[in-house]
């Protein structure tokens, strides 16, 4: 099981700017890594930037020595072409980040952005979005936010060369906490909504501690580095979303679909002081037909909404943010199973989740397949080796983000190399990654929900309450008996540009920003004092190594590391 147990530790002090900070190694001195960017390309896992806490050494989460709050300032790579055990023989390489030779500029130091792998014929990976963390501005090498002129960068792992890409006014700003997905087979990378804050770009006029939700879905063509920005009014009208997740599912419809799950919502263009409340229910799923962006009559694409339930219309996941998704399809493609791991909510006190749920398509049913007491959020995960979910980084509670000594949860990540291994067919955690694992088989717990066998043959071919729209049913090769209409797109031809979204806050800073700030102050004044503590993102509110104490939800200490 995914668990821990430690004796009480003596509370120590954080070394916000220790004299040895410049000597810290992101792999040898690893304590916790979170809000990073990661991607797999040609059998190698790449991890770029992210917040990190460093320690002299650790033993399965037990910290030895001084803790330093800082950042991973390298590109870390892990070879996945061979099997390994993270307890004994995993190999990690940290490469220096170099400047674009044509401009002399380094890539931005960002957290909560995304990496895309690009097509198989492309040697590069791509960085989009993210924000600069102010958790410790005294950390050696820290840089203030860049201007948002270049929101897209490429990186060639072979030559270790970074390059700026000018995408013009299609994506002139650098959002963070958006929902990202990639259709590698088509050369399309997607970034849905997100938010801007004071770390998004230099001098953007956004008040520290506040954020602005932005609408639109950025579509990056990684083949020719062109960008489109689609309106997302079909999804949530004048609301925008952040901290949810989106998964590309190939083999559905003509060109595959995007499945948008969870996160938080708030009115676009307005200043707000938190992004982890107003959580979306896990019964509401949004589906994007990728084929629709090829159709000139639907320039913003086509979205559908679908209700998701358990087989008996009960027992669905709690609303959450900062989780991760991977998808595995039955061998006969009769079901596509989206695995959701971890996350947290905005409750007071917060709930941190150590759960794995599976959303099966086309039945749109949730199945709970794992529950433990070692939570994880602000992590990433990837499908590797046919049936393995590889988790990368993440933390169990706010105390780990802050670098606070703690017994429960432990001070550091007990997965001492920052990766976890989960067999998606046998439903077991372990430390061994099998590069030659057999093909994915549908687990018995999922079969009990959707029918069929380990290799497929799902008998539940539509949602228990039927498809909400005939257009969505048609994508799955079905047709409704009733006259439910497909969504109309004639009223949504206007493309949403993030520039327009931000102008209401930045371009008119003398008027709208002041009004937004006044509104924020009013909202803050009318909240319960404790509520204000839990709603804030810890990393955005820690400056110069000075941190705020956040009360944590009690956890059991009766379990042992697996």
Image (cartoon, rainbow, N blue to C red):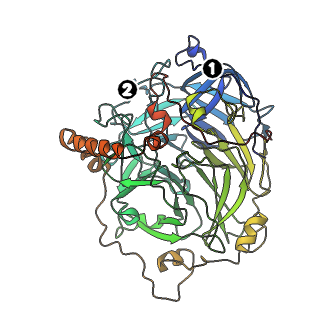
Q: Is residue 439 left or right of residue 338?
A: right
* 90 vs 267: above or below: above
Counting labels gives: 2
Give the residue number, with chain letter if any, for mark 2: 103
Q: Tag 2: Cα neighbours inside 10 Å, few (<14), some, or many (≥20)?
A: few
Is 64 in front, or is 299? Answer: 64
Dividing the picture into quadrants, the one containing residue 54 is: top right
Q: Determine crowd level at label 1: few under 14, some 14-19, many 20+ residues with C-alpha closer than 10 A.
A: few
Does the rendering let one see residue 157? no
**Which residue sits at x=53%, y=78%?**
467
* Residue closest to the eye, 102 or 492: 492
Check whether the beta carbons of the residues at disc 1 and disc 2 lie within 8 A of each other.
Answer: no
> Is 186 in front, or is 151?
151
Circle 1 SS class: loop
- The picture quadrant where one finds residue 217 is bottom left
Closer mark to the observer between disc 1 and disc 2:
1
Q: Position of residue 35 (x, y in %)?
A: 54, 38
Determine whether 481 is above or below 277 in the image. below
Which numbered dot is residue 84? Answer: none
* Residue located farthest toward the top when viewing the structure as drawn: 19
Q: Give residue 14's position: percent from left, percent from top.
A: 57, 20
**Image check: 327 left or right of 539?**
right
Please, what secondary structure does the residue beneath circle 2 have?
A: loop
In percent of the image, x 55 and y 24: which residue is there? 69
- Name the quarter where the C terminus is drawn: top right
Picture coordinates of residue 231, whole percent (x, y) = 35, 59
Q: What is the spatial separation of the Cα atoms under label 1 and label 2, in whole angstroms?
A: 44 Å
Q: Is residue 462 above or below residue 79?
A: below
- In-front residue for pair 212/460: 212
The location of residue 264, given as percent across then percent down, is 46, 53
Q: Which residue is mark 1?
A: 12
Name above or below for residue 41 compared with residue 221: above
């Amino acid at each position: 099981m995914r668990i821990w147990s430690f004796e009480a530790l003596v509370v120590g002090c954080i070394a916000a700017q220790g004299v040895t900070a410049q000597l810290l190694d992101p792999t040898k001195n690893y304590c916790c890594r979170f809000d990073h960017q990661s991607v797999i390309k040609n059998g190698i896992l790449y991890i770029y930037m992210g917040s990190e806490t460093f320690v002299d050494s650790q033993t399965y989460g037990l910290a030895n020595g001084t803790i330093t709050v800082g950042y991973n300032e390298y590109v870390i790579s892990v070879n996945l072409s061979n099997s390994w055990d993270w307890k004994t023989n995993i190999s990690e390489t940290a490469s220096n980040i170099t400047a674009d030779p044509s401009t002399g500029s380094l890539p931005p130091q960002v957290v909560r952005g995304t990496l895309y792998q690009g097509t198989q014929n492309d040697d590069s990976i791509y960085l989009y979005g993210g924000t600069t963390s102010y958790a410790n501005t005294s950390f050696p090498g820290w840089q203030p936010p860049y201007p948002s002129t270049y929101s897209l960068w490429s990186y060639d792992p072979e030559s270790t060369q970074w390059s700026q890409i000018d995408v013009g006014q299609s994506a002139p700003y650098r959002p963070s906490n958006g929902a990202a997905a990639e259709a590698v087979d088509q050369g399309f990378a997607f970034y849905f909504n997100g938010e801007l804050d004071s770390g998004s770009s230099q001098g953007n006029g956004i008040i520290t501690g506040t954020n602005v939700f932005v609408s639109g879905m950025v579509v990056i063509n990684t083949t020719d580095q062109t960008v489109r920005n689609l309106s997302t009014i079909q999804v949530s009208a004048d609301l925008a979303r952040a901290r949810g997740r989106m998964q590309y599912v190939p083999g559905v419809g003509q060109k595959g679909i995007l499945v948008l799950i969870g996160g938080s919502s708030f009115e676009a263009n307005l200043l707000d002081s938190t992004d982890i409340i107003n959580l979306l229910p896990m019964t509401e799923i949004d589906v994007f037909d990728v084929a629709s962006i090829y159709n000139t009559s639907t320039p913003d694409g086509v979205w559908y909404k679908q209700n998701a339930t358990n087989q008996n219309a009960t027992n669905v996941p709690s609303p959450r943010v900062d989780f991760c998704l991977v998808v595995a399809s039955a061998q006969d493609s009769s079901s596509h199973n989206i695995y959701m791991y971890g996350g947290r909510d905005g409750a007071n006190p917060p709930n941190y989740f150590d759960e794995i749920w599976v959303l099966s398509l086309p039945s749109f049913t949730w199945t709970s397949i794992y529950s433990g007491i070692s939570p994880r959020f602000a992590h990433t995960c990837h499908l590797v080796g046919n049936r393995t979910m590889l988790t990368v980084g993440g933390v169990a509670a706010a105390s780990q983000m802050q670098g606070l000594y703690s017994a429960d949860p432990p001070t550091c990540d007990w997965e001492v190399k920052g990766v976890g291994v989960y067999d998606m067919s046998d439903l077991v955690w372990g430390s061994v990654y099998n590069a030659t694992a057999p093909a994915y088989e549908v687990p018995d717990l999922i079969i009990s929900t959707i029918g069929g066998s380990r290799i497929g043959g799902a008998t539940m071919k539509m949602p228990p309450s039927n498809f909400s729209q005939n257009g969505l049913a048609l994508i799955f090769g079905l047709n409704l008996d009733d006259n439910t209409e497909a969504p109309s797109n004639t009223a949504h031809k206007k493309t949403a540009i993030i520039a327009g979204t931000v102008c209401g806050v930045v371009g008119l800073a003398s008027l709208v920003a002041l009004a937004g700030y006044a509104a924020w102050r009013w909202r803050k004044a009318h909240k319960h004092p404790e509520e204000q503590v839990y709603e804030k993102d810890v990393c955005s509110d820690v400056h110069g190594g000075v941190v705020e104490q956040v009360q944590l939800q009690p956890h059991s200490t009766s379990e042992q590391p697996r």
